[in-house]
Amino acid sequence: MKGAKDMTRGNPFALLFGFAFSLMIGNVFQQLYTFVDTMIVGKYLGVTALAALGATEWLVFVMFGCVQGITQGFSISMAGRFGSHDEKGLKEDMGGSICLCLMLGIFFTVVGLTLCKPVLQLLHTPQDTMEMAQIYLRTLYGGVCISFCYNMLAAFLRAAGDSRTPLIAVSLAAVCNIILDFLFVVIFQLGVFGAAFATLLSQLFSAGYCLWAVRAGGFGMPGRGDLRIRPERLWRLLKLGIPMGLQNVITGFGGVAVQSVINSFGTVFVAGFTAANKLYGLLETAAVSYSYAVVSYTGQNAGAGDYGRVRRGLGAACVLGLVTSGVMSFVMLTFGRPILACFLSGEERILAETLEIGCAFLRILAAFFWLLYLLYIIRACVQGMGNTVLPMCSSFLQLAMRVGCAFLLTKKIGRAGVFWGEVWAWILADVFLSLCLLWVYRRQSVMREDN
């Protein structure tokens, strides 16, 4: 397949960096979807509209994080097939993934549209933001099938070692999103609906490009027989995809619970936290890129049975992660305030208070950002070796820590307890996943020796 890369050969450091770098640029552009939405909404529609987007942030993550997790789980099986040069099995996995994405896309759309308003009410969303939050969330939830389509195609390309095509797709989509944001929000004045609709159209464009690339890439598409519903094949894919989807859902539910506490602190705090979270999400994209690279690398090498190479790749990824996290922390501390100011407009006193809230969050994140990068890398290595259940369990620990700090620590130290909950969630997950990695690696090595 054109653009595919065999990661069972070559220098692990160079392979991982080269693969992740393309994804990194692509993820930066993908973050621009919400980054630009937030910036334009904050500047042209005001603090209340920005707070409406902030009130929906974790609910958006729950839905679309689940979609990303499920499709990434499917890619683990495909990466193993690619690493072992099993073309027939790879086409079967592609066909099964298409069937599952169609069924799950319809189901998620119905559930999301039905529960949208009750969940916003349950989270104590401020009344002045409720209507706009519903419009924004329902528009995005209506496009879940588009998200499944794009993520499925991108997951297949990454499994085959192709990070260039997703980069091009998401870069073009980001440019499209920026243009449509100005068109719908600024010129046509469609409000938050325009911002959400621009995101959906951009992702549809991205999915179309990935489909064209797969069809034109010289690798056969799944045939009619591969698209037949075979329970045993679908179940095998679901056993990998569902835990990874649930992992993001669990993380999202923790965020939703924390959001209910954040909402209780008022619109100004929600706006400041939202602006800081957007920058946090943008600087987190490198960690996400490394995790995708490690999953593909580990999946291919585990499929080939070379666990010594898996270990060397993990070491290289950790070095890359620590260096990159240091750069991102520097960006937060040095440029955080002027970047946050780009999101905000309004009365000077309120603007200053909102900025201080966002900067306080960034200072805490910057000191411990390296923990987040190690978390992504270690978790991806465990997943790439075929165990997606233990990483899902780590999400329960993160959920408990975030929620516990939001509800209990805030009573002791005030609103900063929300910020510290993020850091303690990273620490607990890092310890747990490190122990899981040792267990999974030793188990796989023993099984290989027995065979």
Image: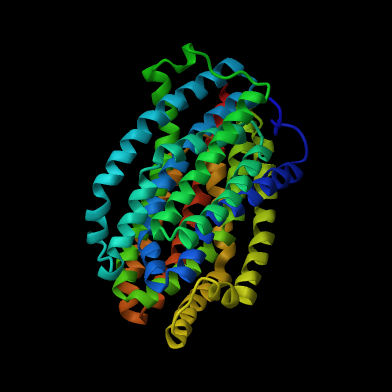
Query: At x 44% / y 43%, what residue is drawn?
Result: 390
Front position in the image: 86 or 337:
337
> What is the tally of numbered marks visible in this picture?
0
Above or below for 303 versus 184: above
Looking at this view, name the residue that lies furthest to the bottom. 349
Q: Hey, which quadrant is residue 310 in on the image?
A: top right
Query: At x 48% / y 21%, what residue is drawn?
Result: 95
Q: Residue 305: where, in percent of width, then height?
A: 63, 28
> Quarter of the image containing the C terminus?
top right
Q: Residue 52: where, in percent of width, then height?
A: 36, 65
Residue 396 appears in the picture as rendered: no
Looking at this view, name the residue that lies furthest to the top. 225
Query: At x 50% / y 40%, what residue is drawn?
Result: 204
> Quarter of the image containing the N terminus?
top right
Q: Is residue 308 left or right of residue 122?
A: right
Front position in the image: 239 or 66:
66
Q: Is residue 448 left or right of residue 137?
A: right
Q: Residue 227: where, in percent of width, then height?
A: 45, 17
Q: Is residue 188 left or right of residue 156?
A: left
Residue 413 appears in the picture as rendered: yes
Q: Hey, which quadrant is residue 4 in on the image?
A: top right
Q: Residue 35: where, in percent of width, then height?
A: 53, 60
Query: At x 32% / y 76%, what residue is drawn?
Result: 265
Above or below for 158 versus 214: below
Q: How is the image coloured?
A: rainbow
